[in-house]
Amino acid sequence: MKRRAFLLGTLVLTACGSSEPSGTIRIAGGEPGGFYNDFAALLHRLAPSPLTITPLETGGSADNLKLLRERTAELGLTLSDSAHLEPGIVALGRVYENYLQLVVLDASPYRTPADLIGRPVSVGAAGSGAALQGERLALGVREQHYPLRNAVDALRAGDIAALLWSGGVPTPELGKASGIRLLPLDGFLPRLRQDYGKVYERVDVRMGVYGSSVEVPTIGTPNLLVCRPDLSDEYASAVVRLLVAKAAQLVPEQALGTQYLDVRSLIDTGTVPLHPGAAAEYRRLHG
């Protein structure tokens, strides 16, 4: 029986009354203003006593995987394409969808990614999943690497022509930046899927997001909550129970679209295997 068929179904929340382990586990999150950071903060707030989940601000996916390797974090959020590059990593669940967003000023003349060739563009902070995706897109731009807030400031100041960001929709930091629009990225999808597999998929940013009057097609990548294989089954099970029982509350307030945490897709972690303790807990919750 396939793993998804075996595990998937209406999850019975029988774990709500279970005793939880004590102690502190650290989660490598992301940049201030991004969904990783917000999601890690929600896990911290909703963790059942006596368990404590402490969020760490980081540059994003690559940074988070590095912290796991160095054992300075027990949990990490990462794009699934970054996770595939990390040997030995295991997942506790697929949490939501990242949208790749290529942002320009609304008043700019740029209408397609090709218009940006040779121009300065922030393609994600060093250590971020956006930086890996920017490299794979091969936009032909003069690459800069700003954290999101600095990239927004540089865009407004005219120091860069565009910024590339991978995050939820709408990203609050971008939502505060009036007079922006997104360029379509779906044209890159066939090559990305050919070179790197089905980890990339087409998604559409809804009309009305960032003031847009049209839907904008772009590229989606699943986000995974990951850990090292030696995380104890006790902690892995506790985190799974939290993801399942609090799914509706583990969505940042600003979120729209289809990137919501969904208990039906938590086990859909692609080629990254589930932690054995997590898999056992999903089976138990299946009823």
Image (cartoon, helix red, strand yellow):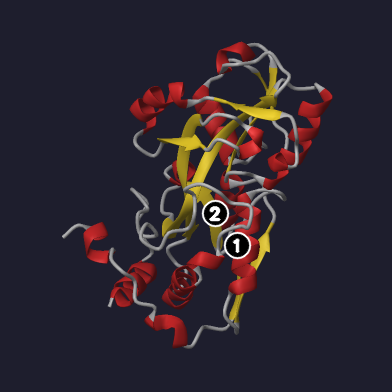
Describe residue 217's horizontal placement relative to residue 181 as left or right.
Answer: left
Q: Provide the residue designation for mark 1.
A: 27
As displayed, is residue 271 above or below residue 225?
above
Q: Position of residue 61 (x, y in %)?
A: 57, 46
Q: Position of residue 231 (x, y in %)?
A: 47, 69
Q: Residue at point 49% right, 66% down?
A: 247
Residue at the outermost left position: 1
Q: Position of residue 218 (x, y in %)?
A: 49, 31
Q: Provide the residue designation for mark 2.
A: 77
Instruction: Tell me, for residue 240, which label it has, or none.
Output: none
**In the structure shown, which secondary structural element does the residue marked by tag 1 occupy?**
strand
Q: Residue at point 38% right, 64% down?
A: 275
Residue 53 can be seen, yes or no:
no
**In the structure shown, which secondary structural element does the residue marked by tag 2 occupy?**
strand
Describe residue 81's horizontal placement relative to residue 265 as left or right.
Answer: right
Badge 2 crowding class, 10 Å Cα cut-off, few under 14, some 14 to 19, many 20 or more, is many
Residues at circles 2 and 1 in contact by the CB criterion of under 8 Å = yes
Describe residue 206's horizontal placement relative to residue 18 as left or right.
Answer: right
As displayed, is residue 286 above or below residue 128?
below
Describe residue 139's horizontal placement relative to residue 12 as left or right.
Answer: right
Q: Residue at point 69% right, 14% down?
A: 119
Q: Which amino acid type corresponds to the residue marked 1 in the rendered image?
A: Ile
As displayed, is residue 114 above or below residue 178?
above
Task: Out of 96 and 232, give the one closest to the viewer.
Answer: 96
Residue 131 can be seen, yes or no:
yes
Residue at the outermost right position: 157
Q: CA distance from mark 2 to mark 1?
A: 8 Å
